Amino acid sequence: MIKTCRNLIIAAGMAFAGMTGMAVAAGDAPAAPKQEWSFDGPFGTFDRAALQRGFQVYSEVCAACHGMQYLHYRNLGEAGGPEFTEAQVKAIAAANDVADIDDEGEAIDRPGLPKDKFVSPFANQRAAAAAHGVAPPDLSLMAKARVGGPDYIFALLTGYEDGPEDFDGANYNKYFPGHNIAMAQPLFDDQVEYQDGTAATQEQMARDVSHFLMWAAEPKLEARRSLGIRVMLYLLVLAGLMYFVKRKVWADAH
């Protein structure tokens, strides 16, 4: 099971390195600059507002090409995540058509339910590859599949530039290995209208969707850290008790 998960992450990372096309030019890209995130450090937590904005960017921009096959709509309402209300989760799910079978065994499309997985933009990998030349990678584990995680995703989304005069490729990206990336620049200022009134600059949208993809790859991050802190405190208390018990036992012995 562990080996299978590891292979999936590696495969996703290789696909993301292509981002609908392989780098043609050789050479190394500069390392993604370190960003400050609310989830950094042992006590870090996800910013709920950023997660909700990031989901909006994903659903309105990224979901046209990229699926998130390991997420269910109900996850959007769970503790530690975007924490949409139950009504919001139902509305988000219902806005997507899900392929299903009715009681007569006929194929139908029905409104999505919270229990359903995120709907893929394509019926299968072949359909995705036919539309883009190569299947766009699934984004569920992307923040764990690349060195730098959310830093790299943010850098990639904001790293589009005019290439040098001798650049003969699809799109020039400063942080993409080889700099030649087939995916055109996906984010532009005011591309979405944030429901909370936040200015939707390219940088803000890139930061929010990177935040969301980090949660998607580590949905239990807060719970795991909380448990780890409680375990460490328990061990410290136990170590203290063991020390005083040891002193008491040996004191009586002498």
Image (cartoon, rainbow, N blue to C red):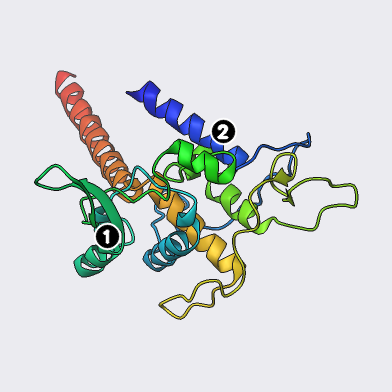
Give x and y (percent) for residue 165. Answer: 90, 52
How packed is label 1: few (under 14 Cα within 10 Å), some, or many (20 or more)?
Answer: many
Q: Work out which quarter of the rendered image holds the C terminus and state it.
A: top left
Q: Does residue 39 appear anywhere in the picture?
A: no
Look at mark 1 in the image and give the residue it sits on. 93
Q: What secondary structure is marked by label 2?
A: helix
**Placement of 185 over or under 175, stated as above or below:** below
Residue 251 numbered tag: none
Does 29 sit above or below residue 10?
below
Q: Looking at the image, how many numbered discs can be counted on the residues?
A: 2
Say whether residue 117 is left or right of residue 205: left
Between tags 2 and 1, which lies in front? 1
Nearer to the camera, 226 or 32: 32
The dot on residue 14 is 2
Residue 154 appears left or right of 100: right
The percent position of residue 144, horizontal first and vertical second, equals 48, 40
Distance of mark 2 from mark 1, alpha carbons?
30 Å
Query: For the point 23% across and 40% down, which residue is it?
Result: 234
